[in-house]
Amino acid sequence: MNYTEGPDIRDTKAPSGPIEERWEKRKFSAKLVNPANKRKLNVIVVGTGLAGGSAAATLGELGYNVKSFCYQDSPRRAHSIAAQGGINAAKNYRGDGDSIYRLFYDTVKGGDFRARESNVYRLAQVSVNIIDQAVAQGVPFAREYGGLLDTRSFGGAQVSRTFYARGQTGQQLLLGAYQALERQVAAGTVEMFTRHEMLELIVSDGRARGIIVRDMVTGEIERHTADAVVLATGGYGNVFYLSTNAKGCNTTAIWRAHEKGAYFANPCYTQIHPTCIPVSGEYQSKLTLMSESLRNDGRVWVPLSKGDSRAPGEIPEEERDYYLERIYPAFGNLVPRDIASRAAKNVCDEGRGVGPGGLGVYLDFRDAINRLGRDAVEKKYGNLFEMYERITGENPYDTPMRIYPAVHYTMGGLWVDYDLQSTIPGLFVIGEANFSDHGANRLGASALMQGLADGYFVLPTTIGDYLANGPYGEVDEEAVAEAEIKVREKINKLLSINGTRTPDSFHRELGKIMWDYCGMERTEESLRKALELIPSLREEFWRNVKVSGTAEELNQVLEKAGRVADFFDLAELMCLDALVRTESCGGHFRAESQDADGEALRDDEHFAHVSAWERGPEGPVLHKEPLEYEYVKMSQRSYK
């Protein structure tokens, strides 16, 4: 796949000066919209997860006219509800040395020095406000015996800064945002559209001015226009078919924006989560995540010897390899996700994996139960243990859990500036749908932090700077009609092929290509192989897919076909981005670029930049945003 290089791109909105003053400086310099004018302005928010739900609720509270869209039957069904372990915040209730600066430092280091300093520092600053907001909404965070909010440790940090509600943190935070959203629905500032899928972005006079959606129940194609559009549609991990994401998660909304001119940043940065229940058969359509919080008290190990098939209880202590504690003594089982995942892959590749096919390692709570007592462990992790037992039939109180890495989160996404605005004026992108805060690897418990920071605190300020120049007048009818025609033509094309293969069969085959050739470890050879296979499979898809039913009804096969078509195009860009970035960093591990210990070897001279891809008429165009570090010295990451 050929590409060209374009001019560098710069984030012109990021303030200068002392880093701790930059967000305040930007807030003060941003234009304000007076309350009377807010009632004249319309904003579309696509997605109702933590980012989208909190954004729509806050914008409605501020007085804007908001339309909120989701493809689920309720905003409560957004995938954010599946997040288990917790949310980071630099409150330092433990007095263990945490601070805003330390959260900032841990995040930049955890992202392998591939994130923007200004964005990450703002995230750390805002984190302390998120907890207050959530508590005020009634989110039932765990509390210690004295009544203060409790915290626990997560990967990539040596302090306890993760606030949690057992293993249901995402659910409780989403319900808080949902209540705030429904309050605005009742107040009339937010109009809710459930079971509606965005299929096209309307761009008029160079600005994002609306969306084309399909009513998933009736099949009706609808036009919706506004002064600004906000995408909060999550990540694209389902390009791999098997992932921890909900089956509905897709790339269509951000890919439509990319086709209309929004740059796509760092598409190759994919997070492989180390703590998932291993694949159990070809029939599976998704994987189940076990919270990273389990690594607080669980110890990860494999047998010392290859091919040891004894039950875990029969393997004595001296014949066990607690490999994370051995290799990374300073952080032990709490190393970041990318490092824990590769370490698990390595020991399994050596033939020391456990369970069917040898694709698993043990996560053992024996020592924690002996030290704390079963009741204490059950209070912290009971619902997670119960979930594991329901899925595997094994009791983790008696037998160690078996876990293996799986696709979880995507650090790449649409490129945005400091204001969270894409390269299309008026198109703002928040949460996992953008690329901005995590670099090449996200630390655990930081997804919820970023989603709520963007939705509650950052976007409501920065979008006002854009909307202060509105309303932007009538939307060009020709632009709206063109967008609608494009949607209808694609639907008709999918329905007319009448081939012999289901969309799901194509998705499964694409996912296997991506996992085998662009998964936990990439090489030039594997990526070039993927770039041969993907276009061939895409060609067969457009020639031989079978979409049953009609467009004028509930048609989940049609929905799936459209999403799989977009995954083909995204997969190709992901592999190209991974091929061009010949260094290893965070979740992007090129086998050709590793040190003597097998750790990721960065190339700061050539790759200390964001890769922002433009969809040009002659093919992809790569724009680079140089990353400059004033406060954190770039160094080889070490958790030893």
Image (tube, helix red, strand yellow):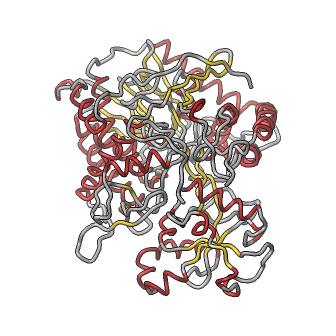
Q: Which quadrant of the figure contains the N terminus?
A: top right
Name which residue lies at 49% across and 52% down: 79
Q: How many marks?
A: 0
Q: Position of residue 608 (x, y in %)?
A: 54, 33
Decide if residue 544 is in sight here. Answer: no
Name which residue lies at 66% across and 62% down: 344
Name which residue lies at 61% across and 78% down: 400
Instruction: Residue 88: name its quadrant.
Output: bottom left
Decide if residue 427 is in sight here. Answer: yes
Residue 492 located left or right of residue 330: right
Camera-side residue of 530 and 586 = 586
Q: Position of residue 78 (x, y in %)?
A: 46, 50
Q: Position of residue 77 (x, y in %)?
A: 46, 53
Q: Which quadrant of the figure contains the C terminus?
A: bottom right
Q: Position of residue 10 (x, y in %)?
A: 45, 22
Q: Is 297 placed above or below 181 here?
A: below
Instruction: Residue 571: name its quadrant.
Output: top right
Camera-side residue of 469 and 36 = 469
Camera-side residue of 297 and 221 = 297
